[in-house]
Amino acid sequence: MGRGFDPHPRSARLNGPVAQWSEQGTHNPLVVGSIPTWPTGNFDQNSLSEEVINVPSSNKPAEFDDIFAANQAFANSFEHSHLTGTATRGLAIVTCMDSRISPLAVVGMQAGDAKILRNAGARVTDDVLRTLVLATYLLGVKRVLVMPHTDCRMAKNNEAEIHAMIDEQHGVDTRSIEFRTVDDQQSALISDVTRIRTFPLLPKGLVVVGAIYDVATGLLNSVDCNA
Ligand SMILES: [Zn+2]
């Protein structure tokens, strides 16, 4: 991985369930066996069952040490206290979860400027529409950029192949999920932009465009979605 980042830095030298998690894909790193039921109401760490392991007193697994340390540094020089939840530059970006994309930087914006909606493949799902309704009527969004990207994993395999891949590698049958893979990025983008433009609950004046972000050059290549 780039810059030597290891998301599970301790796992390689652990013999316990954390190692089991990273190798076998158990959903929760803290619990062995069945899916945990999280405590509700007044949280009391002592009430957790003995199955819960490796929970430091601070309830922060060591795998997150770098995260909380970095956050402390971030908070020490925090400059965004004045911001509100309104997108000051009126933009929403629908993009992929791909870790190469820094959506605000791509369009020269900063915290407070835009709403960012991300999922696998930058697809306009029901939840994206739900979020855009809130973002447009209540949070200042007046324009939407739908921004998939080159070299997207969601455009490299079809649904059946991805289900088969996960089953083969992890023994999990994921066929109850539709991944919304993409056969042709341009036509998928046109269809997703159209889905926003024609969604009856969104404001009539909302401006929606589509562009494919090139992860090799940083350039946005706009796509004519009026066809
Ligand atoms: Zn992607």
Image (cartoon, rainbow, N blue to C red):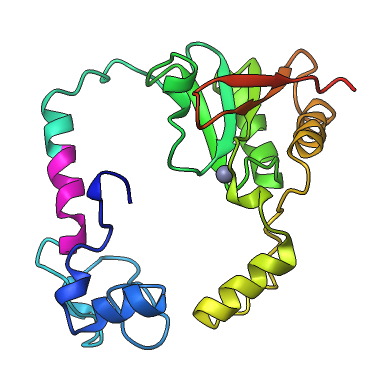
Q: Can residue 59 be seen in this snapshot?
A: no
65 on left or right of 89: left
Q: Which residues are magenta?
A: 61-71
Magenta segment's dominant SS is: helix
Q: Residue furthest right?
A: 227
Q: Is 69 one of the magenta-colored residues?
A: yes
Location of residue 158 in the rendering, given as x and y in whole percent from the top left corner: 73, 59
**Which residue is located at x 70 percent, y 72 percent?**
176
The quadrant of the picture showing ligand 1 is top right
Residue 21 seen in the figure = yes
- Identified at 67% across, 48% down, the residue is 155
**Left or right of 107: which side holds 130?**
right
In the rendered image, the quadrant that contains the C terminus is top right
Name the residue at 50% across, 78% down: 170
Q: Please say if 65 is above or below 117.
A: below
How far across and down, in percent of the image, does residue 6 sit? 25, 57
